[in-house]
Image (spheres, helix red, strand yellow):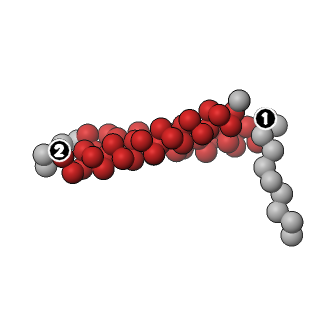
Amino acid sequence: MLKIIVVALLLFVIVSLFTAFYYLVKDPPGSTRVVKTLFLRVGLSLFIMLLLLMGAKMGWITPHEFGL
């Protein structure tokens, strides 16, 4: 279940990135929609990282081990 949530959030981050690019190209100079959209993307990325760390700590997901 956690994997589905993470994938959905990652897709939302990608949509947010392309939305910011669209606003960058189409909006008039001085518009703040690009900054707001990129701020949302950074916030979602941080949330995903915290969710993955919490999931690994709680045992909901198991990270792969590196064969060193």
Q: Is residue 47 visible?
A: no
Amino acid on which the number 2 mark rests in the picture: Asp
Q: Which residue is mark 2?
A: 27
Location of the N terminus by quadrant is: top right
At x 23%, y 41%, the residue is 32
Q: Give residue 7's mark.
A: none
Crowd class of label 1 (few under 14; some 14 to 19; many from 20; radius 10 Å): few
Q: Is residue 25 above or below residue 68?
A: above
SS at mark 2? loop
Give the crowd class for mark 2: few <14, some 14-19, many >=20 residues within 10 Å: few
The residue to which callout 1 is attached is 60
Residue 29 position within the rendered picture, expressed as x and y whole percent measured from the top left: 13, 49
| For residue 55, side relative to residue 49 (left or right) | right
In this rendering, position of residue 19 left or right of residue 8: left
Taking depth in this image into account, of 54 and 2 the one nearest to the observer is 2
What's under tag 1, amino acid-wise?
Trp
- Quick one: quadrant of the C terminus? bottom right
User: x%, y% of residue 62?
Assistant: 81, 44
Residue 58: quarter of image? top right
